[in-house]
Amino acid sequence: MAKIRIEDTIMSSAFPGFGFSSILSGTLVVSGTVPNGNRTYDYDFTVPNNVFVIAYYTNNDTSSFSKGRYRVGNMPNAAIDGVGNNTFIYGTQTGTNYRVEVEIDNFSGGPLTVPTQNLLLEVYLFQPPF
Amino acid sequence: MVDFTKIALSSSYNTDKIVFTASGTVSIASLPDEYNSFGTIIKRLTIAHGQTRPLFIDFRFSLDGGTTWKTGGSGEYAIGYSTSTNLNILYFGSTGTFTYEVFGSWIDGYDGTNPYVEPVQTDAKTYFDSRLRYRKVIGHGHFISSGSTPTSISHTQGTPVPYSVYFTSRPNEVWQEHSGGVKNKWLFDFSMVECFSYSTASNVVVETSVSTDVWYKVYGNG
């Protein structure tokens, strides 16, 4: 097959794309107090075996949608403020279970009160071209 | 407004093009060491991708031979970046085995050269299947972030959208997003750039710690 200028093509059978077999959604509730250190919250999806999961998250404070981090209430932007308070969202797939886990790190020295938030979760199931 | 959940493929919208895939299992101890800014060992898996410019990297990894998988990036224990010749996966740990599935997709408009690319379709595999819904690119581009104020990329979907953002964290390297300030384990020195992004109903917002190159793709929902 001849070489192709990719940027001139909308789609091409010469190159795989990201084809999703399903999109699942759920809600993970984050609330309460995070002690000095960290606390985790989790939500489980049932997925087929051996799919590649691409996950997105939004919270009800900002209606934002992100891949790996979100803002907790009125906390400053932990991403680049240098303070070190971090929020992470992990995804772990074990067989047919895909667990979304939120970890809130609290380095403030005392308990951190987290406003109740409903995180909307969307996971896109993708069969990689291997 | 287009309902992307009802369209498998559309000639009105670009799809991503995956131009490289690889998978395998390696001994973590056998990988070369790097040290992050805290002095912690970071292992680096390097895979030649066969192109002449960086790609967007996506991967998943397993530490138990494929029973449990995590998608690499951001807060995980593995993150990826691409140079013009290699895909690199960094792992925060030093023992065990590392099983990976990695793929690289084309960055439209990376350098304006629009080169000819060798197809990866070499057998009878089905690479497009109308039973699946393909991610449709409704916007893509490159900009140089200000480093002091967020950059907003507008879209008209009316809800937060899926997207991809990659950036130059070190010169000549296109990274998955990472951030976290003094707790960011992916900083090898404090001259490295951090990047954080999110989508709202009308924008994708990108913040970086200092001015740098950013590439993005915005997708239609579904």
Image (cartoon, coloured by chain):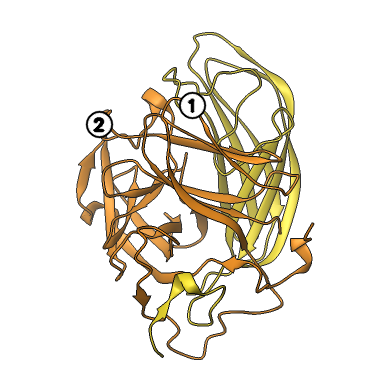
Tell me, what hue is chain A?
yellow
Q: Residue furthest front?
A: B112
Chain letter of mark 1 equals: B
Identify the residue shown where x is 55% and y is 80%. Answer: B127
Q: Which chain is orange?
A: B
Circle 2 residue: B189
The residue carrying mark 1 is B149
Q: Label 1 amino acid?
A: Thr
Residue A39 pos. (x, y %):
58, 26
Work out which quarter of the rendered image holds the N terminus of chain A and state it.
bottom left
Q: CA distance from mark 2 to mark 1?
A: 23 Å
Picture residue at 34% right of the left edge, 42% below the top: B92
Relative depth, front residue between A74 and B207: B207
For residue B1, side relative to residue B203 (left or right): right
- Vertical comparison of A64 with B175: above or below: above
Q: Is residue B85 left or right of residue B186?
A: left
Image coordinates for residue A115, horizontal then vertical, percent: 71, 19
In terms of depth relative to the viewer, which is nearer, B97 or B194?
A: B194
